[in-house]
Amino acid sequence: MTDLGSGLRGSLLVSDCRRLDTVFGPFELAEFRNLETHRSCFALSVGDLAGEEPLLVRVHSSCVTSEFFGACDCDCATQLDGALEVIAAEGRGVVFYLDQEGRGAGLAAKARDRMLVQASRLRLTTFEAYERMGLRPDLRRYEEVAAMTALLEIEAPFVLLTNNPDKVAALEREKLRIAGLQRLERTASPFNVHYLSAKRRSGHVLADASGTRRAELPAAVEAVEPRALPGRPELVRIARYLLPILPARDAGSARAEPVWLRLHLYVDVELGGELVVLTREAGDGASALARIHAEPLLERFPLRDPPAREAWSWVVQALASHGSGVIAFARRSASGAPSPSERQGALVELLVHHLRGRRVVPLCSPGDRDLAAELRERGLQLEAARSLVRPE
């Protein structure tokens, strides 16, 4: 990779360059900060990017639910991993990673999309849900790709790793040259066949998966309207729906059974940003595990040693064996800087809201803040804390 220094192109500023060790080998990572949106985007590259020889390129939009939580109801994480694997094998190429959840509409829209689809008992597609919300099917933008390409001094045309032909026209509008397409496809599973079938009907080049059995939801989902948390008007619940999660990133969805958790998405209208709570519910009277867990941005990539995501896989297995629990997520920057104390207070407030009336078992890692003390101060009945350790 060229020495980027502190380059600036439009509103995109180079903020960091480092080596990133993935399960497919080492990549060079360049982080860019958009001074207009205050969001980060990334370029992960291998090999010499100079010259006119066509370059393997994946333009990828973020998906926290699959890339960190391990959800298998879409194909986003498998496409990201597949692109990195193909590029590593080729020895030359780039993955441009954009912070564009929900096809550019944001995590709140994505969560409400999933909620509306599930509340319809899968009669609605993701694109029909967007229409009901008054959104266009795809709101993604690609000017950041053009800026990163210029800062990386890439002059070669792209061989685009995608199943979506519409992405070609979108990138060409940014004056990027496309030399061809290369498909990235994985076999549909019972948990994502409904989503992939909708993408195929919308024009994505995907195999016909109509013969794949569709998984049934384990519980009913109700479409809810935004509502503030009682006593905390700044914390507004936007959506809740069911998420099938595989504890390990490399567990094939066709070979492993997921753990179903319910995702609750809140928006902090004062501090900004979204707060995620994942719950697993057993019968009345059962004690519930409780934890605040970090979601470092770089651990959305398939790293060789991802401590937070590895710990998250242990949490999922603990939830599966215990049967009940509430996990709130502290969002962190790519550098791993801790969230502000106000965010910690909001996360504790959400835990209290979801745990009230149940006995609580704090699930702790070494070095965690004393969550037990904070929950006890809020009047919750606690049992002995449980250490988060690797399952046998």
Image (spheres, rainbow, N blue to C red):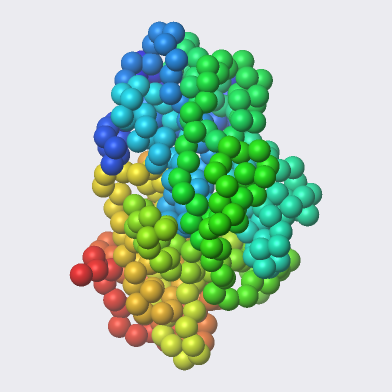
The spot of residue 374 in percent (x, y) is 42, 73
Q: Is residue 352 above or below residue 100?
A: below
Q: Residue at x 26, y 34 (%)?
A: 25
On the rendered structure, is 349 left or right of 390? right
Q: Is residue 334 above or below residue 267?
A: above
* Res. 48 in view: yes
The spot of residue 117 in percent (x, y) is 67, 61
On the rendered structure, is 5 left or right of 240? left
The spot of residue 19 in percent (x, y) is 29, 31
Q: Residue at x 47, y 12 (%)?
A: 156
The residue closer to the viewer here, 328 or 88, is: 88
Q: Residue furthest top?
A: 51
The residue closer to the viewer here, 278 or 241, is: 241
Q: Residue at x 31, y 69 (%)?
A: 364
Q: Is residue 241 above or below residue 194?
A: below
On the rendered structure, is 175 left or right of 63? right
